[in-house]
Amino acid sequence: MKNRIKVLRAEHNMTQAELAVAVEVSRQTINAIETGKFDPSLPLAFKISKLFDLPIETIFIDE
Amino acid sequence: METKQSSWKATSKRNIRQLAYWTGGWVVAMAIASFGQKYFWEDNTVLTIIFIFIATLVGVGMILMNRKYINSLDEMQRKVHIEAMAIALGVGVVGGLSYSLLDQANVIGFSAEIADLVMLIGITYLIATFAGLNRYK
Protein backbone atom coordinates (compact mmCIF):
# COMPACT_ATOMS: atom_id res chain seq x y z
CA MET A 1 0.00 0.00 0.00
CA LYS A 2 1.35 3.40 -1.02
CA ASN A 3 0.89 6.51 1.07
CA ARG A 4 1.49 10.28 0.99
CA ILE A 5 2.72 10.63 4.56
CA LYS A 6 6.18 11.88 3.62
CA VAL A 7 4.71 14.61 1.40
CA LEU A 8 2.12 15.62 4.00
CA ARG A 9 4.80 15.72 6.66
CA ALA A 10 6.89 18.02 4.51
CA GLU A 11 3.86 20.26 3.85
CA HIS A 12 3.23 20.51 7.60
CA ASN A 13 6.94 20.94 8.31
CA MET A 14 6.95 17.90 10.58
CA THR A 15 9.72 15.44 11.34
CA GLN A 16 9.16 11.69 11.58
CA ALA A 17 9.75 11.96 15.32
CA GLU A 18 7.07 14.66 15.69
CA LEU A 19 4.54 12.63 13.72
CA ALA A 20 5.40 9.57 15.79
CA VAL A 21 4.72 11.54 18.97
CA ALA A 22 1.41 12.83 17.63
CA VAL A 23 0.07 9.35 16.79
CA GLU A 24 1.82 7.56 19.70
CA VAL A 25 4.08 5.14 17.86
CA SER A 26 7.85 4.88 17.49
CA ARG A 27 9.76 6.88 14.87
CA GLN A 28 10.87 3.55 13.33
CA THR A 29 7.22 2.65 12.75
CA ILE A 30 6.56 5.95 10.93
CA ASN A 31 9.65 5.33 8.81
CA ALA A 32 8.50 1.77 7.97
CA ILE A 33 5.03 3.07 6.99
CA GLU A 34 6.50 5.84 4.80
CA THR A 35 8.78 3.43 2.97
CA GLY A 36 5.90 1.00 2.42
CA LYS A 37 7.49 -1.76 4.48
CA PHE A 38 4.70 -1.80 7.05
CA ASP A 39 0.97 -1.23 6.58
CA PRO A 40 -0.65 0.54 9.53
CA SER A 41 -3.75 -0.76 11.26
CA LEU A 42 -7.08 0.99 10.61
CA PRO A 43 -7.01 2.85 13.99
CA LEU A 44 -3.49 4.17 13.27
CA ALA A 45 -4.46 5.14 9.70
CA PHE A 46 -7.45 7.06 11.11
CA LYS A 47 -5.22 8.82 13.65
CA ILE A 48 -2.93 9.96 10.81
CA SER A 49 -5.85 11.08 8.64
CA LYS A 50 -7.35 13.05 11.56
CA LEU A 51 -4.01 14.68 12.26
CA PHE A 52 -3.65 15.90 8.66
CA ASP A 53 -7.40 16.58 8.46
CA LEU A 54 -7.76 14.59 5.25
CA PRO A 55 -9.90 11.62 4.21
CA ILE A 56 -8.09 8.33 4.77
CA GLU A 57 -8.29 7.36 1.07
CA THR A 58 -6.37 10.46 0.03
CA ILE A 59 -3.44 9.46 2.26
CA PHE A 60 -3.35 5.71 1.71
CA ILE A 61 -3.60 4.38 -1.83
CA ASP A 62 -4.30 0.71 -2.48
CA GLU A 63 -2.04 -0.61 -5.24
CA MET B 1 2.64 16.95 21.92
CA GLU B 2 5.72 16.82 24.16
CA THR B 3 3.61 15.59 27.06
CA LYS B 4 2.20 12.84 24.84
CA GLN B 5 5.70 11.77 23.84
CA SER B 6 6.88 11.87 27.43
CA SER B 7 3.91 9.76 28.44
CA TRP B 8 4.33 7.08 25.71
CA LYS B 9 8.11 6.94 25.94
CA ALA B 10 8.10 7.07 29.72
CA THR B 11 5.62 4.18 29.90
CA SER B 12 7.72 2.19 27.43
CA LYS B 13 10.95 2.85 29.35
CA ARG B 14 9.28 2.03 32.68
CA ASN B 15 8.00 -1.29 31.30
CA ILE B 16 11.46 -2.22 29.96
CA ARG B 17 13.03 -1.36 33.33
CA GLN B 18 10.42 -3.37 35.26
CA LEU B 19 10.83 -6.34 32.90
CA ALA B 20 14.60 -6.20 33.48
CA TYR B 21 14.05 -6.19 37.27
CA TRP B 22 11.68 -9.18 37.11
CA THR B 23 14.03 -11.09 34.78
CA GLY B 24 17.03 -10.35 37.00
CA GLY B 25 15.06 -11.36 40.08
CA TRP B 26 14.03 -14.62 38.45
CA VAL B 27 17.62 -15.42 37.41
CA VAL B 28 18.82 -14.78 40.99
CA ALA B 29 15.97 -16.84 42.48
CA MET B 30 16.72 -19.69 40.05
CA ALA B 31 20.44 -19.54 40.90
CA ILE B 32 19.68 -19.73 44.64
CA ALA B 33 17.23 -22.60 44.11
CA SER B 34 19.76 -24.44 41.89
CA PHE B 35 22.98 -23.97 43.85
CA GLY B 36 21.70 -23.34 47.37
CA GLN B 37 21.49 -27.01 48.28
CA LYS B 38 25.00 -27.64 46.98
CA TYR B 39 26.77 -24.68 48.59
CA PHE B 40 24.65 -23.40 51.52
CA TRP B 41 22.13 -25.70 53.13
CA GLU B 42 23.09 -29.19 51.89
CA ASP B 43 20.39 -31.70 52.94
CA ASN B 44 17.63 -29.28 53.94
CA THR B 45 14.89 -30.26 51.46
CA VAL B 46 12.38 -27.83 53.00
CA LEU B 47 14.63 -24.85 52.14
CA THR B 48 15.09 -26.20 48.61
CA ILE B 49 11.32 -26.48 48.13
CA ILE B 50 10.78 -22.98 49.53
CA PHE B 51 13.33 -21.46 47.13
CA ILE B 52 11.95 -23.39 44.15
CA PHE B 53 8.49 -22.05 45.08
CA ILE B 54 9.87 -18.49 45.32
CA ALA B 55 11.63 -18.85 41.95
CA THR B 56 8.38 -20.08 40.39
CA LEU B 57 6.42 -17.14 41.84
CA VAL B 58 9.00 -14.62 40.59
CA GLY B 59 8.88 -16.42 37.20
CA VAL B 60 5.10 -15.93 37.04
CA GLY B 61 5.67 -12.22 37.79
CA MET B 62 8.20 -12.06 34.96
CA ILE B 63 5.74 -13.70 32.52
CA LEU B 64 2.99 -11.21 33.44
CA MET B 65 5.42 -8.29 33.12
CA ASN B 66 6.54 -9.57 29.72
CA ARG B 67 2.91 -9.65 28.58
CA LYS B 68 2.45 -6.07 29.82
CA TYR B 69 5.62 -5.01 27.97
CA ILE B 70 4.51 -6.63 24.69
CA ASN B 71 1.08 -4.99 24.96
CA SER B 72 2.66 -1.57 25.53
CA LEU B 73 4.64 -1.74 22.26
CA ASP B 74 3.35 -0.06 19.11
CA GLU B 75 1.83 -2.25 16.39
CA MET B 76 4.98 -2.71 14.30
CA GLN B 77 7.17 -3.54 17.31
CA ARG B 78 4.50 -5.99 18.52
CA LYS B 79 4.44 -7.67 15.09
CA VAL B 80 8.24 -8.07 15.19
CA HIS B 81 8.11 -9.63 18.66
CA ILE B 82 5.19 -11.94 17.84
CA GLU B 83 6.98 -13.22 14.74
CA ALA B 84 10.17 -13.71 16.76
CA MET B 85 8.23 -15.62 19.43
CA ALA B 86 6.62 -17.84 16.76
CA ILE B 87 10.05 -18.67 15.31
CA ALA B 88 11.59 -19.25 18.76
CA LEU B 89 8.71 -21.52 19.78
CA GLY B 90 8.93 -23.51 16.54
CA VAL B 91 12.70 -23.87 16.74
CA GLY B 92 12.38 -24.83 20.42
CA VAL B 93 9.82 -27.58 19.78
CA VAL B 94 11.34 -28.97 16.57
CA GLY B 95 14.98 -28.53 17.63
CA GLY B 96 14.33 -29.71 21.18
CA LEU B 97 12.59 -32.92 20.11
CA SER B 98 15.23 -33.68 17.47
CA TYR B 99 17.94 -33.09 20.06
CA SER B 100 16.14 -35.42 22.49
CA LEU B 101 15.83 -38.11 19.79
CA LEU B 102 19.57 -37.83 19.06
CA ASP B 103 20.21 -38.38 22.76
CA GLN B 104 17.83 -41.37 22.93
CA ALA B 105 19.50 -42.93 19.88
CA ASN B 106 22.91 -42.38 21.52
CA VAL B 107 24.08 -40.40 18.51
CA ILE B 108 25.43 -37.60 20.72
CA GLY B 109 28.01 -38.37 23.38
CA PHE B 110 26.34 -36.33 26.14
CA SER B 111 22.84 -36.17 27.62
CA ALA B 112 20.35 -33.59 26.32
CA GLU B 113 19.75 -30.97 29.03
CA ILE B 114 16.75 -28.64 29.38
CA ALA B 115 19.22 -25.71 29.78
CA ASP B 116 20.38 -26.29 26.18
CA LEU B 117 16.78 -25.91 24.99
CA VAL B 118 16.31 -22.70 27.00
CA MET B 119 19.49 -21.27 25.45
CA LEU B 120 18.36 -22.31 21.95
CA ILE B 121 14.99 -20.58 22.42
CA GLY B 122 16.60 -17.46 23.89
CA ILE B 123 19.21 -17.09 21.15
CA THR B 124 16.64 -17.78 18.41
CA TYR B 125 14.28 -15.14 19.88
CA LEU B 126 17.10 -12.59 20.03
CA ILE B 127 18.25 -13.21 16.44
CA ALA B 128 14.66 -13.23 15.10
CA THR B 129 13.89 -9.94 16.89
CA PHE B 130 16.95 -8.20 15.43
CA ALA B 131 16.23 -9.65 11.98
CA GLY B 132 12.62 -8.42 12.22
CA LEU B 133 13.63 -4.91 13.30
CA ASN B 134 16.21 -4.80 10.51
CA ARG B 135 13.56 -5.79 7.93
CA TYR B 136 11.46 -2.71 8.74
CA LYS B 137 14.41 -0.29 8.79
Image (cartoon, coloured by chain):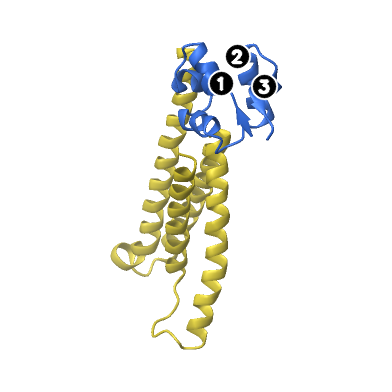
> Dividing the image into 4 quarters, which one contains the C terminus of chain A?
top right
First in sequence, mark 2 or 1: give its number.
1
- Given the image, on which type of amino acid does mark 3 rest? Phe
Q: Secondary structure at mark 3?
A: helix
Residue at 47% from the left image edge and 69% from the top image edge: B114
What chain is tagged by disc 1? A
Is B56 placed above or below B19 here? below
Is B126 placed above or below A16 here? below
Residue at 46% from the left image edge and 43% from the top image edge: B133
Quarter where residue A56 is shown: top right
User: Disc 2 vs disc 1: Cβ atoms closer than 8 Å?
Assistant: yes
Q: Any mark on residue A46, and which? A: 3
Instruction: Name the residue tied to disc 2.
Output: A51
Instruction: Name the residue tied to disc 1.
Output: A23
Quarter where residue B115 is shown: bottom left
The alpha-carbon separation of the residues under discs 2 and 1 comes to 8 Å
Residue at 63% from the left image edge and 20% from the top image edge: A47
The alpha-carbon separation of the residues under discs 2 and 3 comes to 8 Å
Give percent across and percent down for residue A1. 64, 34
Q: Any mark on residue B125, and which? A: none
Q: Front-most of B122 and A21? A: A21
Say few, some or many: other residues with alpha carbon within 10 Å of mark 3 (under 14 / 14 to 19 / 20 or more). Answer: some
- Given the image, on which type of amino acid does mark 2 rest? Leu
First in sequence, mark 1 or 3: give its number.
1
Give percent across and percent down for residue B36. 34, 62
Say few, some or many: other residues with alpha carbon within 10 Å of mark 1 (under 14 / 14 to 19 / 20 or more). Answer: some
